[in-house]
Image (tube, rainbow, N blue to C red):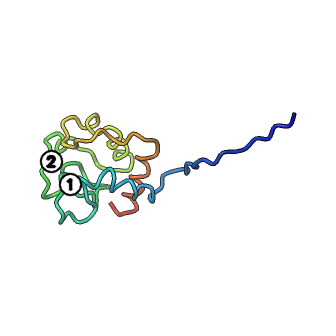
Amino acid sequence: MLVIAVALASPVLAEGPDPVRGAELFPIRCVECHVITDGAEKKIGPSLKGLIGRTSGTLEGYDYSDAMKTAGIVWSEQTLKTYLVAPRKMVPGTKMNFNGLKRPGEVEDVVAYLLEAGT
């Protein structure tokens, strides 16, 4: 008996962080509360422009929680990834009312987008 295997078409997951996918996720998962501009447009959360290298709770003009002000986190690619998985676990008492990015690749893609966007 001859058996012919047929491969079904399925989406291929891209390897590694993808800023394009991150750009697609940002408006869905982040833009309700954050912008990545100079912050002229006020949102619930602080602007993410210039985030990398900034110490948590220090952006002028945003009313951070005491927890974020005293956390002393210097935002880097790694600290941001950790925070985006479980914000309230990393900084108990943060105002960020978000349970984190849970789907595989989302954190890496959003961080890649933020890095490319000049945060």
Q: Which residue is mark 1?
A: 46
Q: Is residue 80 found left or right of 105 in the rendered image?
A: left
Where on the picture, by quarter, is residue 103? top left
Where on the picture, by quarter, is residue 100? top left
The C terminus lies in quadrant: bottom left
Q: Nearer the viewer, residue 7 or 71?
A: 7
Where on the picture, by quarter, is residue 118? bottom left
Q: Which residue is mark 2?
A: 64
> x, y (%) of residue 76?
35, 50
Seen from this angle, which residue lies furthest right? 1
User: Which residue: 40% across, 57% down?
Assistant: 24
User: Which residue: 22% across, 34% down?
Assistant: 92
Q: Nearer the viewer, residue 38 or 7?
A: 7
Q: Nearer the viewer, residue 60 or 35?
A: 35
> x, y (%) of residue 53?
30, 55
The N terminus lies in quadrant: top right
Q: Is residue 66 found left or right of 75 in the rendered image?
A: left
Q: Is residue 101 found left or right of 89 in the rendered image?
A: right
- Alpha-carbon distance for marks 1 and 2? 8 Å
Residue 22, compared with residue 97, is above or below; it is: below
Type of the residue with mark 1: Pro
Of helix, strand and loop, which one carries label 1? loop
> x, y (%) of residue 6?
73, 44
- Closer to the chain start, of discs 1 and 2, is 1
User: Which residue: 55% across, 48% down?
Assistant: 13
Type of the residue with mark 2: Tyr
Query: Counting other residues with Cα less than 10 Å from the Cα at mark 1, is it few (<14), some (14-19), or many (20 or more)?
Result: many
> x, y (%) of residue 65?
14, 43
Residue 9, compared with residue 102, is above or below; it is: below
Q: Are marks 1 and 2 in contact (CB under 8 Å)?
A: yes
User: Which residue: 20% across, 40% down?
Assistant: 94
